[in-house]
Image (cartoon, helix red, strand yellow):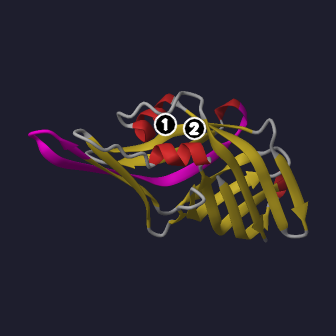
Amino acid sequence: VGLAAPGIAAGKSKSVILRSGKLTLAFSPKAFAALTKSTTGSFANTRTWSPLAPATVAAAAGVFTFPLSHGKVNVQKLTGQVATQGGITLQNTSTLPLLGTSTTQFALTGFGLHLGGAASMLSATFVGASTSPNLPLATLSTRHAKHSKHGHKVTISGVTLKLTSTGVQILDGQDHVFKLGEVLQTVSFSGTT
């Protein structure tokens, strides 16, 4: 995940307020391949992930980008929260002998990033047959994170992103290709005042 915010105002305690920008959710090649895994034969299954506007996707790189709605972070302490707009939709189409083809679809919207020690988390709202807000999709570790500030630009990078059991359940479906604690990629974000 990465974030860039061109509208930031410095606050007290070395915190910065994010008024605009973007957050990027980057999957490793292995993870993105698992997300879009399809099977053929008698029990064919096709999974399609697509961005929900105003989010966008660079499929070749496995990167989703979400505009920021608001946020506040402490660059030195690597703490804070950010919220986004848009989301990701999943369409799963299965073909079974005698039963034909069926399609299910759900969305993950309002991705949020919370940085703060052991409670660091990437969350999102699940929208399907029912709506479940603030589901914890992945834990975040700042152990190997880096931060910098050059003029009005701040950057935090290298925050490790690992799947929670909820994240595994949502992303995995019935394919059993993801595991608890699996590293999807890292979180990085930058912004300017």
**Residue 51 in the image, given as x and y percentages of width and height:** 45, 62
Q: Quadrant of residue 99?
A: top left
Q: Is residue 111 magenta?
A: yes
Picture disc at residue 189: none
Q: Is the Cβ of the residue at disc 2 closer than 8 Å to that at disc 1?
A: yes
Residue in view at x 52 percent, y 39 percent: 137
Q: Is residue 71 magenta?
A: no
Specify the amino acid type for callout 2.
Answer: Ala
- Disc 2 element: strand
Q: Quadrant of residue 133?
A: top left
For marks 2 and 1, the one nearer the N-term is 2
Using the image, determine if residue 86 lies above or below residue 112.
below
Q: Residues within 10 Å of mark 2 (few under 14, many from 20)?
A: many
**Residue 138 in the image, given as x and y percentages of width and height:** 57, 38
For the stretch drawn in magenta, the main secondary structure is: strand
- Disc 1 element: helix
Using the image, determine if residue 116 lies above or below residue 90.
above
Residue, disc 2: 138
Q: Which residues are magenta?
A: 94-117
Residue, disc 1: 167
Q: Residues within 10 Å of mark 1 (few under 14, many from 20)?
A: many
Residue in view at x 30 percent, y 51 percent: 105
Using the image, determine if residue 150 lies above or below residue 96.
below
Q: Residue furthest front?
A: 41
**Residue 30 in the image, given as x and y percentages of width and height:** 57, 43
The answer to whether residue 40 is left or right of residue 100 is right
Residue in view at x 35 percent, y 33 percent: 174
Task: Determine the CA span between mark 2 and mark 1.
Answer: 6 Å
Specify the amino acid type for callout 1.
Answer: Gly
